[in-house]
Image (tube, rainbow, N blue to C red):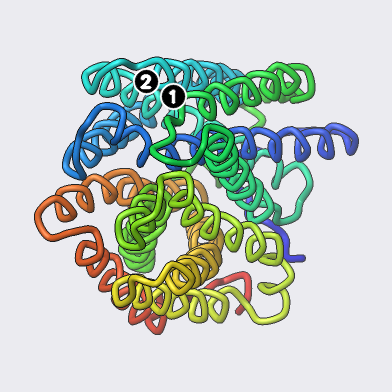
């Protein structure tokens, strides 16, 4: 497994602490995934509860995304001034609280407030847990980020299963996701309580100990901006899949919301599998080859979901989407870190998360005017553009040259 680049002064952990940190970060990513999976999978049921339409759901997701983008800047500053451990865990607690507000929300206005709380909490948690992931990679001196993202996807799978399971328990038809959200919040809270004790504190590193070479601010290479554009496209496709797969299946296949959550289950399941295999695939074929395979697979999946109304075929399409997009993000972020460390990684991540969080809101407006199936043409086109960019110099990884 390839060595990781140093993006900050190395934090000194013992071997036991390094292993404990990896286990804790896996747990934090998993908890975040559970909450995001339950949130995304509950959209069809919430739409029925408050009697809104696709545009209303789009506003809900757009507000949540905007809150997250703003909160990410705050989360980054907090993590820099102290350590990422506390903001990662505390924001997880406030995110769980947001799910409870959604569970009891009697109207659309309350849902909007809850969406802001969930979005802002997720923004802080996202930045902080990825910063913890960088600490874990530096401490262990090996690549583990794909595994962390796999646990996020696994958590999303579990969160979507909560929605499906409680919908079946309630009889399936127009099932309200209230109890699924309560269960997800409870599971997350228990997990976070354990992680407070299990996540090791980073040893203090004096500023004077930092390598002056690491504090220089070189110019941003052109490759970084190409990677940023790629992140924009894959963020849009992945965000669409996670937030809209359930509603797409519900509306196009004409099934109950509980069955519709199978769309998100399919996306999350294949993302888990491919990300668990990610490190070995990169070791065998290289990062560029993995991305060049993943992008057209995602395009093929979107091609299926925009051309059929058959439930089995739609689910196959979402399986392909999850398989394709699951290969891309960890590799793009790794290349960004290799070519320019934390500074370039921050730029590329900003592109990706902006599209990931704002894209679903755009799909909501398009769905309201043109229908959910036609709205999926946009991520299909984004996937085509991403595929074209995989054959540029953007994927040149200095670690593999």
Q: Is residue 79 left or right of residue 175?
A: right
Q: Is residue 29 left or right of residue 76?
A: right
Instruction: Answer few, some or many: residues within 10 Å of disc 2's Cα (few below 14, many 20 plus, some between 14 and 19).
Output: many
Taking the spot 24% from the left edge, 58% from the top edge, the residue there is 372
The one nearer the camera, 102 or 216, is 102
Q: Are marks 1 and 2 in contact (CB under 8 Å)?
A: yes
The one nearer the camera, 354 or 310, is 310
Instruction: Answer few, some or many: residues within 10 Å of disc 1's Cα (few below 14, many 20 plus, some between 14 and 19).
Output: many
**Residue 280 location, quadrant:** bottom right
Numbered circles on residues, count: 2
| Residue 125 position within the rendered picture, expressed as x and y whole percent measured from the top left | 51, 29
| Residue 197 position within the rendered picture, expressed as x and y whole percent measured from the top left | 77, 17
**Residue 381 location, quadrant:** bottom left
| Residue 6 position within the rendered picture, expressed as x and y whole percent measured from the top left | 63, 49
The one nearer the camera, 387 or 299, is 299
Taking the spot 35% from the left edge, 41% from the top edge, the residue there is 44
Q: Is residue 348 visible?
A: no
Which numbered marker is on residue 121? 1
Residue under numbered circle 2: 117
Quadrant placement of the N terminus: bottom right
Taking the spot 41% from the left edge, 79% from the top edge, the residue there is 300
Taking the spot 42% from the left edge, 37% from the top edge, the residue there is 42
């Amino acid at each position: 497994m390839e060595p990781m680049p140093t993006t900050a002064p190395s934090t000194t952990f013992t071997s036991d602490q390094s292993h404990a940190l990896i286990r804790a970060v896996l747990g934090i990513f998993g908890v975040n995934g559970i909450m995001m999976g339950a949130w995304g999978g509950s959209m069809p049921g919430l739409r029925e509860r408050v009697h809104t339409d696709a545009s209303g759901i789009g506003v809900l997701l757009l507000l949540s995304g905007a809150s997250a983008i703003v909160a990410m800047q705050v989360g980054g500053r907090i993590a820099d001034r102290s350590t990422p451990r506390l903001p990662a865990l505390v924001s997880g607690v406030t995110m769980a609280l947001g799910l409870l507000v959604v569970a009891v929300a009697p109207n659309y206005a309350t849902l909007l407030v809850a969406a802001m709380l969930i979005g802002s909490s997720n923004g802080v948690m996202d930045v902080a847990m990825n910063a913890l992931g960088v600490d874990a990679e530096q401490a262990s001196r090996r690549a583990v980020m794909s595994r962390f993202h796999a646990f996020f996807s696994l958590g999303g799978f579990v969160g979507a299963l909560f929605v499906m399971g409680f919908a079946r328990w309630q009889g399936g038809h127009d099932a309200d996701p209230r109890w699924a959200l309560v269960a997800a919040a409870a599971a997350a809270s228990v997990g976070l309580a354990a992680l407070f004790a299990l996540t090791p504190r980073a040893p203090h590193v004096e500023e004077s100990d930092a390598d002056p070479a690491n504090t220089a601010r070189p110019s941003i290479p052109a490759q970084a901006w190409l990677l940023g554009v790629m992140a924009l496209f894959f963020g849009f496709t992945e965000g669409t899949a996670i937030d809209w797969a359930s509603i797409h299946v519900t509306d196009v296949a004409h099934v109950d919301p509980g069955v519709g959550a199978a769309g998100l289950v399919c996306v999350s399941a294949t993302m888990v599998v491919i990300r668990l295999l990610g490190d070995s695939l990169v070791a065998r074929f290289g990062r560029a080859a993995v991305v060049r395979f993943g992008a057209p697979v995602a395009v093929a999946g979107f091609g299926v979901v925009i051309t059929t109304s058959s439930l089995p075929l739609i689910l196959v399409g979402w399986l392909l989407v999850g398989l394709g997009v699951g290969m891309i993000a960890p590799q793009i972020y790794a290349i960004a870190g290799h070519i320019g460390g934390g500074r370039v990684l921050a730029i590329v991540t900003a592109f990706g998360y902006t599209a990931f969080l704002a894209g679903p809101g755009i799909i909501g407006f398009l769905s309201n005017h043109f229908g959910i199936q036609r709205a999926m043409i946009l991520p299909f086109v984004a996937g085509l553009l991403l595929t074209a960019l995989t054959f540029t110099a953007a994927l040149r990884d200095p670690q593999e040259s």
